[in-house]
Image (cartoon, rainbow, N blue to C red):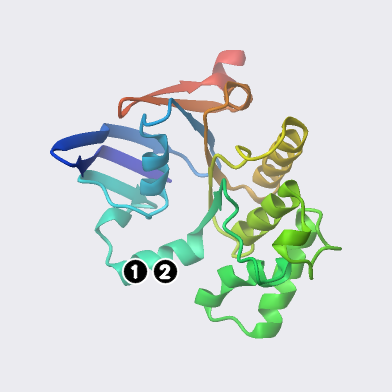
Amino acid sequence: MYRLSGVTKQYSRGKDTVHALRGIDLVIEDGDQLVIQGPTGGGKSTLLQMLGGLDRPTAGSVELDGVDIAKLSETKLTKVRAENIGIIFQSFNLIPTLTAQENVETALVPLGLKVSERRARAAEALESVGLSERLHHLPGELSGGQQQRVAIARALVKKPKVLLADEPTGALDEGTRDDILALLDGLWKEYGLTFIMVTHDSAIAKRAPRVATIKKGQITVKDQAAAAK
């Protein structure tokens, strides 16, 4: 479970101070699906970075299972990310000289697994996203949707409890977007993940059980599943 209390993030931009987050209080239960929506510059990606331990707040706490990850040493924080948090990026972030299988394997290197186990788990993860026949293809030989599936497999191969996605369909056409969303929803249900996704797309937000709208660093959460009952 995530529990954020009084999370503030400030940046200096020249002589100005940017208030990206302004005292965010938020609870995300295990197994929740939450979509974070808001305008560009509203703070949604900054909030996702806090949840992923990719940035630290100026003030406040970011607890994951009772541990304030914002106060962990870099070594301990890296371990938490390696074992518990999978992250999907809009730009895929695949290494162009590695095959699909090798790209997925990179997520397992910090866990110290044997090469044979890494290969087997990477192949299994790619099969789970429908790419069992593309193991040895380079990213440049794959479509945008296929590259995003590789990125999803890389995030899931470590068997995390949390899956974070930053605009995972932003670079895709509408048809491919819907395929990826259906895949993510199915994986969330199958593996019981805590799934948190940032998007600017209102059509995506409407499908989510819970939506957190963030504007000017402040957040409002709506439970759409409960409201629909």
In which quarter of the view is residue 105 placed?
A: bottom right
| Depth order, front residue of 218/139 | 139
In which quarter of the view is residue 42 placed?
A: top left
- Percent across and percent down for residue 60 are 22, 43
Residue at 68% of width from left, 39% of height from top?
172
| Depth order, front residue of 143/14 | 14
In which quarter of the view is residue 213 placed?
A: top left
Q: Give, as a three-letter code, the residue at label 1.
A: Lys
Q: Quadrant of the C terminus?
A: top right
| Depth order, front residue of 12/20 | 12
Residue at 35% of width from left, 64% of height from top?
77
In the displayed structure, 189 sits above or below 67; it is above
- Percent across and percent down for residue 174 are 73, 30
Direction right: furthest residue: 133
Packing grade of label 2 (10 A; few <14, some 14-19, many >=20) is some
Q: How many marks?
A: 2
Per the image, the residue denoted by label 2 is: 79
- Percent across and percent down for residue 52 are 42, 52
Q: CA distance from mark 2 to mark 1?
A: 5 Å
SS at mark 1 in the image:
helix
**Residue contact at pointers 2 and 1, CB within 8 angstroms:** yes
Residue at 59% of width from left, 28% of height from top?
208
Instruction: Tell whether 127 sits left or right of 163.
Output: right
Q: Give, as a three-letter code, the residue at label 2.
A: Lys
SS at mark 2 in the image:
helix
User: What numbered label is drawn on residue 76?
Assistant: 1
